[in-house]
Image (spheres, rainbow, N blue to C red):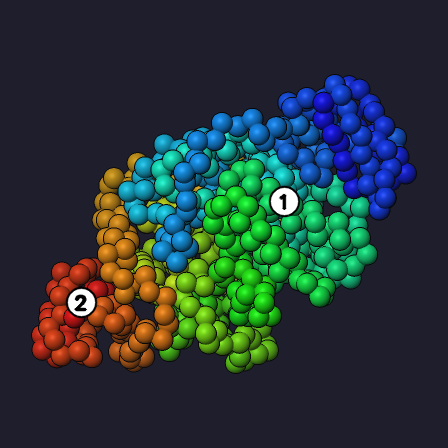
Amino acid sequence: MAFFKVWAPRAQKVQVKVKNSLSNLNAKDHGWWEAEITKARPGDDYAYVLDDRDKPLPDPRSPFQPYGVHGASRLVDHDAFPWTDSGFQAQPLSSAVIYECHVGTFTPKGSFEAMIPKLDYLCDLGITHVELMPVNEFPGSRGWGYDGVDLFAPHHHYGGPDGLKKLVNACHEKGLAVLLDVVYNHLGPDGNYLDQFGPYFTDRHHTPWGRAVNFDTPGSDVARRFFVDNALMWLRDYHFDGLRLDAIHAIVDTSATHILEELANEVEALEAYVGRQKVLIAESNLNDPRVIQPSGFGGYGNHTQWTDDVHHALHTILTGENQGYYIDFGSFADLAKALKNAYVYDGQYSQFRRRNLGKPPHHLNGHKFVTFLQNHDQVGNRAQGERLHHIAGIDRLKIGAALLFTSPFVPLIFQGEEWAASTPFLYFTDHQNPDLGKAVLEGRRREFADFGWAAESIPDPQNENTFQRSVLNWHECETEPHQSVLQWYKKLIQLRKQFPELTDGRRQDVQVDYDETKKWINVQRRNISTVCNLSDDPQEIALPVPEKPVVLLKSGNEISIHDRGVTLPPQSVAILWQ
């Protein structure tokens, strides 16, 4: 027996097709339809038929789409999975080292279960939290997941509901927390049938991807509940330890209680009920402290913010690039401010945006910010999917990593970064509609014009080779120079866990000295200094404390310690203890 319930206020008649049998649903208040079907069981396929139309539609809340975005849904019994993680408790986010990965390219098989043998590697690296890029159903067999449509259904090509539960359970058995990237600011166009059921979208607001999700116009109560329930499902039924909320700056909500505040309150209630820490990480490019302030103090109540300013400040210094949105960055002063403040733009004029941006995060701890040297966006949204070392070289990659891991913020690594993977991470899709695939390629070519990248240099996302080139080559991390880079990352993570100065999020204790002309920077965390020379000449850099320092880690062999400070070779970094 199964209970079917669907919100379809735009329909005059609703039926559910279970296997090959049609049954009428009963109309209820406010556009709801429901019925109990005695012969339906978990594992049965089903779909909804609206107003006797020829094409049955997937359930908006489908728990599994075994035939893809256009096929029938399948009933799932979430209570049937044999979880063994009852004793697991995630480490606090304040002590986290996050590893972002894409299921389809993380291993050659590209599935949930294929990731499990790699978990020991992540533990040995020092990772505490694994963050999966979106895994809900999206078109075809390959994609980033940000154009997903069936938000409640783990992708069938990755292994569906059971495969995902096996992965999360295995992570917990290894002591790894698991975070999931979710997209609530838009849905993809291919297989998006929500509009046929009800007003899930609104013409009042618009996003870069089209009409906005309906969070504040007629019908929004049920639409809001749809997304809140989705978040709770991942945290409850799949035992995820937290969610990364994609691009919340593209969510428009004029309600008295913002959808993000409502979501945070609901997650807090679930956390209390299940007795496990659940966290929300909100991506925002608005530099608005309200995102991470408690709801009782006028904020949205998210635990941390995924913020780009630290990345942009590091990237421009390490690579010299200043096109597109990088035009707002590029000085050592920007980098110094980012490493202490998280926001570079906290109220001043942004040339790229042509307006003032941001507000100072005066009282917020560094643990409220997730920062990174690379991530899926900053690598994948380049013409050739180049990683940082492809542009700046391995010496500068090591400098950037040292600054990231000795910062007061929560660090994140993107898959393969830690061994300077030779493989790019390109943008790839598998739209079954060729016109849509063509439109995606043309749209990316227009988008990248600001960066000066030639249109013909951008690989076709629909070409399967674009995807295959992005699959990690695990064999190379055992060869040079990859093995040395991997050891560098391991040592940085070990240092971060060894010295409390490095996990302390109190930003007022961070001091930064730099010389714009000579191209050096020194970040001090009480007794620890991260001294970087980004010039092509040796640099003598004075230290604020007269005692002779101890070298904890260095990237160059010709470092000289003396009474006045330290002399670093070109393109090198040293982490010192005094």
Residue 567: horizontal and vertical position, in percent? 15, 72
- Quarter containing the C terminus: bottom left
- Horizontally, residue 98 falls left or right of residue 256, namely left
Q: How many neighbours does mark 1 have within 10 angstroms: few (below 14), some (14-19), or many (20 or more)?
A: some
Identify the residue shown where x is 36% and y is 41%.
175
Please name the amino acid that badge 2 sits on: Trp
Judging by the rendered image, the residue that carries numbered circle 1 is 230
Q: Secondary structure at mark 2?
A: strand
Judging by the rendered image, the residue that carries numbered circle 2 is 577
Identify the residue shown where x is 53% and y is 38%.
238
Please name the amino acid that badge 1 sits on: Asn
Identify the residue shown where x is 42% and y is 73%.
341
- Residue 221 lies, with reference to residue 543, above or below; the image says above
Q: Quadrant of residue 552?
A: bottom left
- Give 374 or 36, whichever is nearer the viewer: 36
- N-terminal-most mark, 2 or 1: 1
